[in-house]
Amino acid sequence: QVQLAESGGGLVQAGGSLRLSCAASGSIFGISAMGWYRQAAGKQREWVAVITSGGSTNYADSVKGRFTISRDNAKNMVYLQMNSLKPEDTAVYYCNYYGGTTWARGNWGQGTQVTVSS
């Protein structure tokens, strides 16, 4: 059973930056697409970014040009560099084995809270 552990969240002012990290267990990590998702209070979880096993990336329109997803297959790690943060980016951020923009393949971890103040 795969496990996911997100870290790196915090409180930041609008316009600031944060880098999230995700440690993933599982022997299939290196051949799997990985995604970042987020859930704001009172809203459904939404997809943010995806990176394939080969390093191709795609982003939700709301974060395109501001967020960058990357991975280190040797360490089973996925990262999300978030720049030019906005208050509407406030949410709990999760990583997971990517299934699609509306679902993920693994069990959800605890997530990491990102709060952007105006």
Image (cartoon, helix red, strand yellow):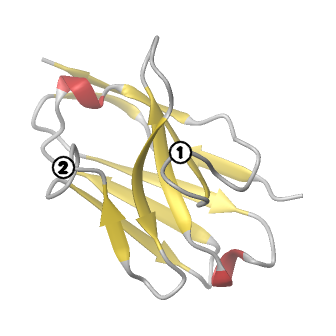
Q: Amino acid at mark 2?
A: Asn
Residue 39 spot, x, y in % from top left: 47, 28
Q: Residue at x 76, y 78 (%)?
A: 28
Residue 20 spot, x, y in % from top left: 43, 50
Query: Relative to residue 4, is residue 35 drawn left or right?
Result: left
Quadrant in the picture for the N terminus: bottom right
Q: Amino acid at mark 1?
A: Thr
Q: Nearer the viewer, residue 103 or 37?
A: 103
Q: Residue at x 12, y 44 (%)?
A: 84
Residue 63 spot, x, y in % from top left: 23, 48
- The image shows residue 12, relative to residue 52, as above or below, that is above
Q: Residue at x 33, y 66 (%)?
A: 58
Quadrant in the picture for the C terminus: top left
- The image shows residue 50, relative to residue 42, as above or below, that is below
Q: Residue at x 76, y 45 (%)?
A: 107
Residue ID for mark 1: 102
**Residue 8: image tag:** none
What secondary structure is marked by label 1?
A: loop
- The image shows residue 85, relative to residue 3, as above or below, that is above
**Residue 83: image tag:** 2
